[in-house]
Amino acid sequence: MRWSREYVRILKAIRCVKVDMDTPRDMEASGPFEARYLAFLETITQLRPRLHRYCSRMTGSVMDGEDVVQDALFEAYRKLDQYDDSRPLAPWLFRIAHNRCIDFLRRRGVRIEAETNAMSPDLVMPVDPPVLGVGRAVEQLVITLPPMERACVLLKDIFDYTLDEIAELVSSSVGGVKAALNRGRMKLAASPKPVTPRREVSPELSRLLHLYVDRFNQRDWEGLRKLISADARLRVADRFAGSLDESPYFGNYERMTVPWRLAVAEVDGELAVVALRQYGDEWRPSSVARLQVTDQHIAHIVDYAHSPWVLSAASSVAVAQPS
């Protein structure tokens, strides 16, 4: 795998593992990390699942949420030399992640005109909104809200940030946050029970996913490669990004010693591939991968095997029964 030095360094920094501060075996030849980089590593080790939970609810997908988190951590890592290390890191990282979520929603074509109204304090409702409670029900429903209201409800009712902290995170005023929060709560109180939305599934994607899983489970690597385009790209979250041909991806699965197999599944309404591990007589989903299809071939694979919080954050995982 031909990784650049910068890419390797950043992967080491954002990888969610316990860092041995006393024996920096993996540090670059340029010397030990500065205090701010060590603080960054320690902070994201604790904060990573919360960032993913927030970004997943903002984007409406546990896989999109993880992609946004990784983009945010890359951005934060590159900007650490500009950061005022007298301030806490967590709110700064949340703000970067929030901005990345908004960028993602804009690219996806979500209408965000409601954010403009929420920026001014003149729309605060005089009546206290109903108490919504917390938990997955609220988290599932927030996807129906405009992004500003969605962010304020999540940050206040799920993550327990203060109004002042939220205002700084979303680049608004306290009055604007109150307005967005009240509107969001009122809408959620009137919403029906949450139902996992089902994304439209391409028949071609479904066909290729089932073929991919069947040949993978048979260890038919030659047959598997016939389903994949010659220039297919691979990203193993927190480990590798590049050409599939230049990676030992299939070999790594073949060398695994624990019992495993793949299956097609709907993860929060999106068709994906899950890896199953055997626990006694039961097979349970342990990780998820997203495949993209172009011209009747698999063109891109994103595997979240090293990000276990992705699948565990999903509201629903429905594994298709083998045909």
Image: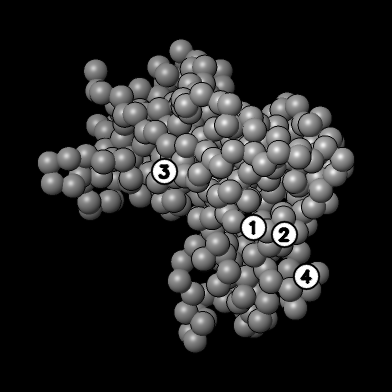
Q: Quadrant of residue 74?
A: bottom right
The residue sitting at the top extreme is 203
Category of crowding for the residue at label 3, using alpha-carbon neighbours closer than 10 angstroms: few (below 14), some (14–19), many (at least 20): many
Residue 20 as seen in the image, left or right of residue 126? left
Check contact, mark 2 vs mark 1: CB within 8 A: yes
Quadrant holding the C terminus? top left
Residue 57 as seen in the image, left or right of residue 213? right
Q: Residue at x 12, y 41 (%)?
A: 281
The x and y percentages for residue 36 are 68, 77
| Along the viewing direction, whichever of 159 and 94 lies nearer the viewer | 159
The x and y percentages for residue 21 are 51, 82
Q: CA distance from mark 1 to mark 4?
A: 22 Å
Q: Quadrant of residue 285?
A: top left
| Along the viewing direction, whichever of 42 and 30 lies nearer the viewer | 42
Q: CA distance from mark 2 to mark 4?
A: 18 Å
Q: Amino acid at mark 1?
A: Tyr
Q: What kind of element bears circle 2? A: helix
Check contact, mark 2 vs mark 3: CB within 8 A: no
What residue sits right under mark 1 in the picture?
Answer: 161
What residue sits right under mark 2 in the picture?
Answer: 165
Residue 181 as seen in the image, left or right of residue 306? right
Q: Nearer the viewer, mark 1 or mark 3?
A: 1
Category of crowding for the residue at label 2, using alpha-carbon neighbours closer than 10 angstroms: few (below 14), some (14–19), many (at least 20): some
Q: Amino acid at mark 2?
A: Glu
Ranked by sequence position, the earlier of labels 1 and 4 is: 4
Q: Residue at x 81, y 48 (%)?
A: 175
Q: Amino acid at mark 3?
A: Leu
What residue sits right under mark 4 in the picture?
Answer: 83
Q: CA distance from mark 2 to mark 3?
A: 29 Å
The x and y percentages for residue 247 are 47, 47
